Image (spheres, grey):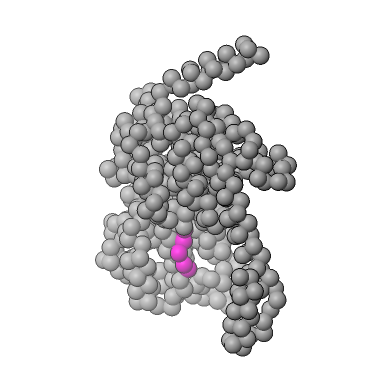
Amino acid sequence: MNGEYSLDTTEGMAASGDPPTNNAVDDYDAEEALERQREEENKIKIKLKSFEGGVYECGLTAAKMSVMVANMLDALQETDLTKIATREPIPLQNDAVTNKALEKIVEWVDHHWDDPPIDPDFDDEKERRNEELSHWDKQFIDIADQGELFDIIAAANFMDIKGLVEVGAKHICNKIKGKSCTEVREMLKIHNDFTPEEEAAIHKENEWIYAKD
Amino acid sequence: MKFLKELTKQLRVLSLLRPRNRFNDRIPDSVLLLIVSKLNVNERIKLQLVCKKWEQIIQLSLERQPVLMISDERYFPLRQCLMESRLSAKHSKQFVIIADNERFITENVLQIFRNVSTICWTTKCLETEFRAMIDTIGKHCNHMSLISVCLFDISTYESTKIINMDSNEKALQLLLNKCQNLQNSSLLYKEYHSSHTSSVLFEGYAIENSNTSSTDASIIHPSPTFPPLLGRMAGQTDARP
């Protein structure tokens, strides 16, 4: 397979008039190899244990989407990855990681394990903001039970799964967009802890913006 | 050991008994910050009144924005605008003017245009308002041969482009084209009262020189080195100090 790709790439370059570069071919091979390794690793199933004690199986590559789990696995210093599968389940000691939440998280990482890794240097807020959720993610995160939704977001944050936290944040953001403070409070069960005076002061400070409503 | 196990079990039960559908109890501050950062600034400012926690987080998100608070009552995206325009605050000639009605133009803008060469316009202005603006510049600011316009999407504070123009007609056309692309942007400022306008102008200048009087318009001197991206005022081309 690798040979085929190498040949095609070189031929393509020669045909276009560019001198074939070994580096490009090597990079391609390296990427291919990494892809295969991730695929192989994902066939290894590891066990994750929720706060409530439920145990869920998950592909290794998928599980490593959680930075926390990846760090824990690194700490094991296990060279033979297949042995990881036979180990005790990894306990996730946070009350947000309920059975339901962990089940959903495993579903999400299993779907997204082969996503390109998030570029940490990518900081284009506008682009990120405008990026629509995929149809699959929309359906995934459209959860009627608000408690469950919050658990998933909090658990994803605890497990440090950036992609899923982003999906949750966008979903909440879409829900509160265009709503008044009262509506947001009602929807998210938030207690208004402002005194009337404090509220009036903030209102006055930003009168120009409330005047538009 | 047994005691510890029992304690853990009890704690687990207790935590599971907590109401799980209350946002503030469940969602960490870092996630709330991420959520509000996805809202545009208007919405953020509005939602400050949800509760104290939200107010603090929203304030934090606004501080993270390159937004400069110029007066007591208003946030002004000046710094971002300057940055995006590859300008520096040293150039005292660049100010952001935001308005959404013709009255603003006729009442307040004239005095500013005498001294300001960069206009950042909102994206909700109507064609007639743009025309009025261009006319105003033409009639009252004869010393300004080139008009530099920085249009930016006010909902994200991201400037789109600096446009150098050599005629008012071109400027108008470009402005209108730009605005059509940015129709979804929301407006940050309803309008300015004339009393605020001068204060904003001079407080803006105070970035460079805090000793600047806030009443005397004549103290705003032409910028010694005019940024290359922007147009130059007539008579200034060869007379840079």
Q: Position of residue B35 (x, y in %)?
A: 45, 42
Q: Nearer the viewer, residue A119 or B113?
A: A119
Q: Is B15 left or right of B241, judged from the image as shown?
A: left
Q: Is B213 left or right of B55, judged from the image as shown?
A: right
| Residue B165 seen | yes
Q: Nearer the viewer, residue A127 or B212?
A: A127
Residue A1 to residue A18: above or below? above
The residue sitting at 68% across, 70% down in the picture is A26
Q: Is B121 left or right of A23, judged from the image as shown?
A: left
Total residue callouts? 0
The residue sitting at 35% across, 24% down in the picture is A196
The residue sitting at 40% across, 69% down in the picture is B141
Q: Position of residue A20 (x, y in %)?
A: 67, 82
The residue sitting at 28% across, 59% down in the picture is B102
Residue A70 lies in the magenta-colored region: no
Determine the image quadrant of residue A132.
bottom left
Determine the image quadrant of residue B72.
top left
Residue B158 lies in the magenta-colored region: yes
Q: Which quarter of the figure is the N terminus of chain A placed in?
A: bottom right
Q: Which quarter of the figure is the C terminus of chain A placed in?
A: top left
Q: Position of residue A203 (x, y in %)?
A: 36, 34
Q: Nearer the viewer, residue A6 or A112?
A: A6
Residue B230 to residue A69: above or below? below
| Residue A157 seen | no
Q: Is A86 left or right of B141, judged from the image as shown?
A: right
Q: Main secondary structure of the magenta part?
A: strand
> In this picture, which residue range is highlighted in magenta?
B157-162
Q: Nearer the viewer, residue A60 or B144?
A: A60
Q: Position of residue A29 (x, y in %)?
A: 65, 68
Residue B18 to residue B161: above or below? above
